[in-house]
Image (tube, rainbow, N blue to C red):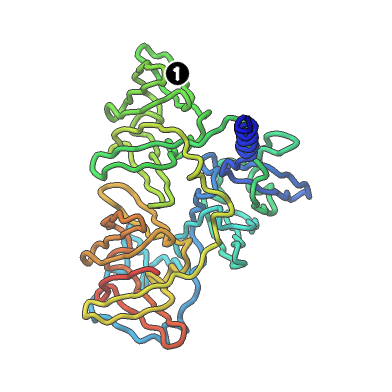
Amino acid sequence: MRTLPLLLVAFVIFGAEHLLAESGRLYGKLFTTDNEVFEGWIRWDKNEAYWDDLIDGTCDQKPKDEIKSKAGRHYRNKERRTTVSIFGLKFGDEGSSVSFGGMSTCQIAFGNVRTLLNDGEGDGTLVLKTGDEVTFSSSADLGSVREILLSDIKEGDIYFDWEDIEKIDFMKEPKDPSDGMERLYGRVSTRRAGEFEGWVEWDVDEVFSKDDLDGEEEGGRTRKVTFDRITAIERRSSSSASITLKDGKEMILRNSNDVNSENRGIVVKSAEFGRVKISWDDFERVEFMPVPTAKLPKYQDFDGGVPIKGTVTTEDGAQYSGHIAWDDDEEYTWEHINGEYKGIEMDIPFSAIASIEKSSQRGATVTVKNGSSYLLRGSNDVDEDNKGILITPDNGKTEEVDWYDFAKLVVK
């Protein structure tokens, strides 16, 4: 006789927890330049709406001249490629006609950020949860942002331009907005790189189940299909795709960048491997799947980044352990290794990396914590243009290992 009440209690508790569940979406308090304050869920630049979405741009590289002057250097005296010539202009290091100064490419998940400050134009300062600050310059995700939509908890949807904003304080969301906007999740098959399962961004634009897929059917009829009606999308050619709906109906759509070679890329994200971006030519098929709510990234899941620590082994067997500065640049777990894997772009956060092993002068194998490995090429993070790996022990002299002597890094 007591079983039924207990089941009812369990049902009520589960129901309450479900209603109060977090959606994993960006949430914060936005302060405008004319002293207004709004609070709610945020969709940034149309395609960033979740805590694991990345702010891309160039950021100030921390000066390491003092560290380098004290470093014990381990490298071969071999000429290295340090400049690239485009339309007669040289870009790169000493001798170039255009200098990048101390800037480097940066990517950081929104979940690591406590406050975003508008510094004007495309510049902004990110105050991390650790209190550290990272300054972005000329970032398309800031000054050239397509739009900033805030769904205010009292006033509804409000659109902002970058110049309207003084700052944003990010925070844990109070509850699921219950607006039916689920995140897209699925398994994406590629022509050469295998399959990737995770959160899907379509055309680097559509991220919600209520977003539309656009195209034309035969005869020129325009169709808009919400993603929550779609089971699968398969590439037919450079100019069309086959769409399978949940009711079993199939249609061929064309003449839209959602379904042809003008597609800006299919992005798949996961805490296990980071972010991959797949071009239309390399895309084969996506099968959409139920949203695994347990995998939804929450604001509290991000720590703001901690120093990268590990052990570097050289080709002659010497080992150095301590705080790592990879490519004389990446020092924190929120930073990323970038490269190309079998034709697709990969951005792997150091927080997911177990080891990096040089495969040749032009590539390295990155193994993530779940055991999967990716041979990356086409980036100075993983080839002979790597600027060196600095290792600083808790007590002792900083060592610098050149790419030519580097063998492997095991991350702690």
In the displayed image of the protein, which residue is found farthest to the front? 1
Which residue is drawn at the image coordinates 64% and 50% (left, top)?
172
In the displayed image of the protein, which residue is found farthest to the right? 35
In the displayed image of the protein, which residue is found farthest to the top? 219
Q: Position of residue 174 (x, y in %)?
A: 68, 44
Name the element at disc 1: strand
Residue picked out by circle 1: 223
Which residue is drawn at the image coordinates 28% and 70% (left, top)?
408
Q: Give the quarter of the image for residue 398.
A: bottom left
Q: Position of residue 238 (x, y in %)?
A: 29, 30
How many residues crowd mark 1 within 10 Å: few (<14), some (14–19), many (20+)?
Answer: some
* Horizontal arrangement in the rendering, residue 340 relative to residue 70 (left or right): left
Q: Give the quarter of the image for residue 181.
A: top right
Name the one closer to the observer, 60 or 333: 333
Q: Can residue 233 be seen at all in this image of the molecule?
A: yes
Q: Is residue 239 above or below residue 148?
A: above
Q: Position of residue 302 (x, y in %)?
A: 54, 57
Q: Quadrant of the C terminus?
A: bottom left
Q: Can residue 177 be seen at all in this image of the molecule?
A: no
* Horizontal arrangement in the rendering, residue 128 relative to residue 188 (left or right): right
Which residue is drawn at the image coordinates 32% and 66% (left, top)?
83
Q: Is residue 411 above or below residue 4?
A: below
Which residue is drawn at the image coordinates 36% and 58% (left, top)?
369
Q: Position of residue 54 (x, y in %)?
A: 49, 51
Type of amino acid under label 1: Arg
